[in-house]
Image (cartoon, helix red, strand yellow):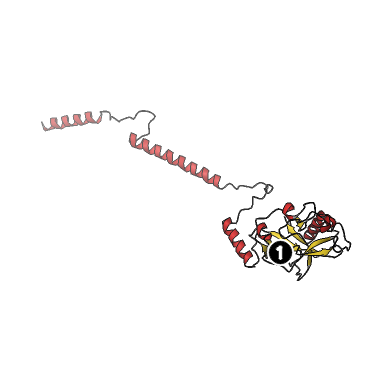
Amino acid sequence: MKNLNLYIIAVFLAMVLTIPVMVYAQPPGLPPGSLLGDLQNQINAEEAARIEGDQNLQNQINTIELIPGPQGPAGPPGPKGDSGIDPEFIDLLCDLYAQTGKSLPEVCSVKLVFLTSSLHNGNLGGVSGADAICQNLATNAGLAGNYMAWLSDSSGNSPSTRFAKSDVPYILVDRTAIALDWDDLTDKSLLHTIDLTEQGNYVDIASVWGSRWDGTSGSTAPTDFCLDYTYSQYTFGDIIAGVGMNNKTDWYWSGGGIGTCDATYHLYCFQQ
């Protein structure tokens, strides 16, 4: 009986050992192992590789040396900027300097005035000839701008009709003001004597061919203007012209006296 039992056990074991082992087969085309986990890992790996590739490409771009081309021509200069200071403040500052006898700062807009370094008789070539004398002296002295003589004639040519009536100070070449503007210039009183030439040389006392203090002619007779400044002979009392004094600041600075046409005097020259 015992042997029978052993036999049965042996047959059972033989049957069990001969049964095929069932292996779970994954669908074709999918990675082995856990389907979802391994698939996600593969996706992550591919994304990481793509990002690394993009970064490597960017690093290569960053290392490319840019070689500049030739420099182009310079452009025209831009407009000059303003001083950034309120213009009204500048005007007040300039007037203050002018009235106190100080040299005006460069920021002040001005018109230059000078006494000619040269002397001339009554034959100036007319008012236009006197203007040319002023302009030539100014140009030779390096003074910019257009200059006219403070002179009148019988035909109505005078500073009041010929000049640009300035609303900024009239100054000497050392920037000392003689008047705040045209109105101040023609009010019978100057702030300072006109005692510097175009070269900045000081002239103490000198006679000057002039006009009326208000810039008008004051006469229609050519004999009152050395025949409109074309005559240079002595005929006292018949043919004369108005003469001022450069050391005066009252109305005698311009046309306060009379002179004969043969005499040689200076001229006042004003920038326009």
Q: Is residue 58 left or right of residue 68?
A: left
The percent position of residue 121, horizontal first and vertical second, equals 85, 62
Residue ranking furthest to the left: 1
Q: Which residue is mark 1?
A: 251
Q: Tell me: residue 2, above or below residue 63.
A: above
| Count of residue discs | 1
Q: Nearer the viewer, residue 180 or 50?
A: 180
Residue 264 image-quadrant placement: bottom right
Q: Is residue 218 left or right of residue 22?
A: right
The percent position of residue 24, horizontal first and vertical second, equals 30, 30
Q: Nearer the viewer, residue 189 or 36?
A: 189
Q: Quadrant of the N terminus?
A: top left
Q: Quadrant of the C terminus?
A: bottom right
Q: Is residue 8 left or right of residue 46?
A: left
The percent position of residue 232, horizontal first and vertical second, equals 88, 61
Which residue occupies 66% across, 57% down?
A: 183
Q: Tell me: residue 216, above or below residue 98.
A: above
Residue ranking furthest to the front: 237
Residue 84 visible in the displayed image: no
Query: Please, what is the three-letter code of the amino acid marked with disc 1?
Result: Trp
Q: Nearer the viewer, residue 148 or 12?
A: 148
Residue 48 visible in the displayed image: yes
Per the image, label 1 sits on a secondary structure element best described as helix
Residue ranking furthest to the right: 233
Residue 202 image-quadrant placement: bottom right
Q: Tell me: residue 6, above or below residue 84.
A: above
Q: Tell me: residue 272, above or below residue 198.
A: above
Q: Nearer the viewer, residue 231 or 218?
A: 218
Packing grade of label 1 (10 A; few <14, some 14-19, many >=20) is: some
Q: Is residue 120 left or right of residue 176?
A: right
The percent position of residue 140, horizontal first and vertical second, equals 80, 60
Which residue occupies 52% across, 44% down?
A: 58
